Image (cartoon, rainbow, N blue to C red):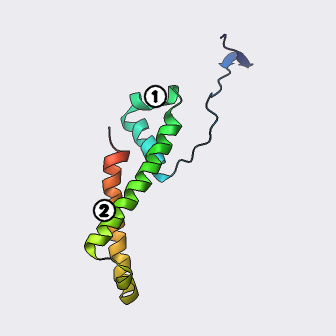
Amino acid sequence: MEPTYTQRGDYLIPNLVLSDTKEYHIGKYGRMRRIYLKEHRPAIYSTLLLTEKLFSHLSEIDAACKTRLDIIEAEMMRQEGVTEALKAADQMEWVRRRNSIHSRAEEIVLHELVYAK
């Protein structure tokens, strides 16, 4: 297949088109993974980008992070007794514990999935 070019002034710009036209939802964790790859793993980032697998990879990481976060949070809440009864009795304590659990669970997920080699 012969590449085609468009002339812009004195330059010939190649007409590049992505073969994968699927739309991917990339959330917070997918964007964090992209930044990590771009800054700390440029070879992996370039490979994924050039093989058109970057967006599917980021979408998969984002979905996996959300799923894993839900599982970890539910287990931590069960172990620490953060229940609806506590929420009804002392809402501020429930919020404090819930935020603490979310922060710890998110740190685990980031270490396991986003910042993994």
Q: Closer to us: mark 1 or mark 2?
A: 2
Dot 2 surroundings within 10 Å: few (below 14), some, or many (20 or more)? some
- In this image, 86 relative to 11: left or right? left
**Few, some or many residues within 10 Å of mark 1 (<14, 14–19, 20+):** some
Please give the name of the residue rendered at 26% of the width and 73% of the height, measured from the top-left corner. 80
Disc 2: which residue:
104
| Left or right of 63 on screen, residue 19 | right
Disc 1 and disc 2 in contact, CB within 8 angstroms: no
Picture coordinates of residue 103, whole percent (x, y): 34, 63
Check the picture and name the quadrant holding the C terminus.
top left
* Residue furthest out toward the left: 79
Find numbered disc 2 in the image and state the secondary structure of the residue it sits on: helix
Q: 50 or 42: nearer the eye?
A: 50
Amino acid, disc 1: Ser
Q: Of the numbered discs in the image, which one, if any, rests on residue 22?
A: none
Q: Which residue is mark 1?
A: 46
Left or right: 2 as drawn, with respect to 64: right
Distance (Cα) linking label 1 and label 2: 32 Å
Name the residue: 54% across, 29% down: 52
Q: Position of residue 21 (x, y in %)?
A: 64, 34
Residue 107 at what x, y percent from top left?
Answer: 32, 56
Where does the N terminus fall, quadrant-wise? top right
User: What x and y, as percent, mark residue 34?
Assistant: 46, 41
The answer to whether residue 9 is above or below residue 93 is above
The amino acid type of the residue labelled 2 equals Arg
Q: Is residue 114 above or below residue 88?
A: above
SS for dot 1: helix
Outermost residue to the top = 2
Residue 15 placement: quadrant: top right
Name which residue lies at 30% across and 62% down.
104
16 and 13: which one is in front? 16
Which comes sooner in the sequence, label 1 or label 2? 1
